[in-house]
Amino acid sequence: MTRCMIALLAGMLLVCGACADMTRTEKTTLAGAAIGAGAGVGIAALARGYLGVGAVVGGALGAVAGNLYGKEQERREAYYPRHHHSKKAKKPPEPQEEITP
């Protein structure tokens, strides 16, 4: 039992460490695949079908959707830099002094 827990913990650390240097598109692709696989298994279980097929099909569709979403987010970040979406109120221009002769 202890060996199993150590192996599980080591696997989790490796997976988490591997995601540190991923781009947004890679992260959303992986997340989409995981969510899609879970949804595919759930739907296959409800339909009394093959769980493995549901996981593969759901994971593939989720990966495609996640990849498209990630690419769109990266495109928007490139087009709209972070400072463009600043929610701070801009100061009104200061009034200029009138010059009297």
Image (cartoon, rainbow, N blue to C red):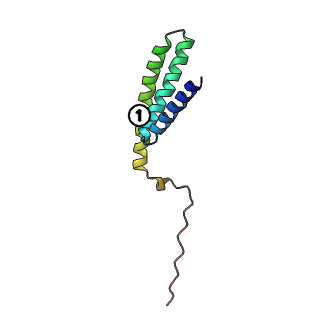
Taking the spot 42% from the left edge, 38% from the top edge, the residue there is 25
**Residue in the picture at 41% in, 28% down:** 64
Q: Quadrant of residue 70?
A: top left
Image check: 2 left or right of 99?
A: right
Q: Is residue 57 left or right of residue 2?
A: left
Question: Helix, strand, or loop for circle 1?
Answer: helix
Which residue is disc 1 drawn over?
68
What x and y, as percent, mark residue 21? 43, 42
Q: On screen, 68 above or below 4?
A: below
Mark 1: amino acid: Leu
Q: Quadrant of residue 27?
A: top left
Local crowd size for mark 1, using a 10 Å CA cut-off: few (<14), some (14–19), many (≥20): some
Residue found at x 43% / y 47%: 77
Q: Quadrant of residue 72?
A: top left
Residue 47 image offset from top left, x and y in percent: 54, 10
Pick the front one: 72 or 63: 63
Residue sitting at x 44%, y 30%: 65
Task: Count the numbered circles shown.
Answer: 1
Q: Residue furthest right?
A: 1
Q: Residue furthest bottom?
A: 101
Of 36 and 100, the residue lying toward us:
36
Please state the horizontal and vertical placement of residue 96, each as a whole percent of the image: 51, 78
Q: Work out which quarter of the rendered image holds the N terminus and state it.
A: top right
